[in-house]
Image: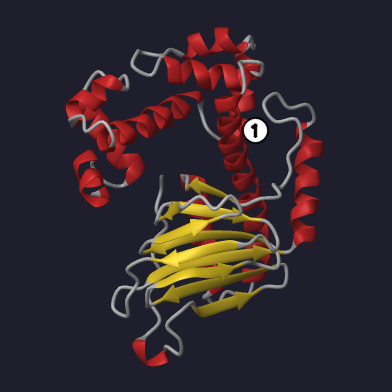
Amino acid sequence: MKKITPIPLIPHSKITQLVEEKNGFNFGVCELNIYETRKEVINFPLSFNGFTITSMLRGRKQVRFSDLINREYLPGNTIISPSYSKLDVDFLKASFEDPTQCTALTIDNSFIKKKIQEFNEVLGDNIFVKSWRILDRPILMYNNEDLVNIHEKITRLSSSNDPFKEIHIKLLLKELVLCVLKMQNVSILKENAETNTNNTPFAAIINFIRQNIHNEIQIEDLLKISSMSKSSFYRAFVTELGVSPYQLIINERLKISKRLLLEEKLSVKETAYAVGFSSANYFIRLFKKYEGVTPKQYIKLKN
């Protein structure tokens, strides 16, 4: 999980409202808005008139989609929201001195459809994902490095005096859409694997990782499980998911480690060994790299 660098807050003298104060930039094909909220609010309704990528920069929110499940929305998280999807948001502990801050990048739907068509034509037959598409429901995801880098470039260009910034932003949008589709694919495939049998290559891979999380897992093990050639295996990960098999294993280890730390109350050392790390120090380094805090700091933040 990668955090996007927060943007300087709106000066107090220019604040006109405490809930969702907006600073925005419009570039025709997309609109970037930065929102700040300075008071606690419950059940704030939110929707966008186009495909929107919204990312948390400061503070904490709780968000609900149509399933009414409460989801923590924190720095390091991004929500992909189709046009007019309804979100209900709680601004928890937001205050005048400690506001929440998020960005919302709304992209023209025709641009999105055109790019998805281009991507599907280039890739042809996929292995994990048969056809790339935009979901008809919102989804919350962890940021990756590519998304953070593209997001920060777009934000920086938006407020710059670069005469070519609209051209640069349109080029970056294509990269961003591709990055988001890959992240979406990973999330959906993981969800499907929990209810599916091992009747797809990805379901077989992810279920094998989860069932053997306490053991050393070799890439060769995943190749056998998937019944794929080595070249097809790596190509599918890179082109369709944007993540390496090694990163997938690490992500699953860290995901389970957070549950063990918080729910099972295992020590850091016990957790490291329980999720397959041979060294507690290596586990701590990786945890901080991906989560931004050490395991002990993570426990303190959650309690």
Is residue 178 among the parts visible in the rendering? yes
Of helix, strand and loop, which one carries label 1?
helix
Q: Using the image, determine if residue 53 lies above or below residue 292.
A: below
Residue plotted at (39% across, 65% down):
6
Residue furthest out toward the bottom: 13
User: Camera-side residue: 97 or 32?
Assistant: 97
Residue plotted at (45% across, 90% down):
16
Q: Using the image, determine if residue 4 lies above or below residue 47.
A: above
Q: Using the image, determine if residue 217 lies above or below residue 147.
A: above
What x and y, as percent, mark residue 116?
76, 46
What x and y, as percent, mark residue 244?
51, 28
- How crowded pointer 1 is (Cα within 10 Å; few <14, some 14-19, many 20+) is rated as many
What x and y, as percent, mark residue 296?
19, 41
Residue furthest out toward the front: 68
Q: Which residue is mark 1?
A: 240
Q: Quadrant of residue 241?
A: top right
Horizontal side of residue 184 vs 7, given as left or right: right
Horizontal side of residue 284 vs 105, given as left or right: left
Q: Amino acid at mark 1?
A: Glu
Q: Quadrant of the N terminus?
A: top left
User: Camera-side residue: 216 or 69?
Assistant: 69
Is residue 168 among the parts visible in the rendering? no
Which colour assignment does the render follow? secondary structure
Q: Quadrant of residue 122?
A: top right
Q: Using the image, determine if residue 115 lies above or below residue 187.
A: below
Residue plotted at (44% across, 75% down):
36
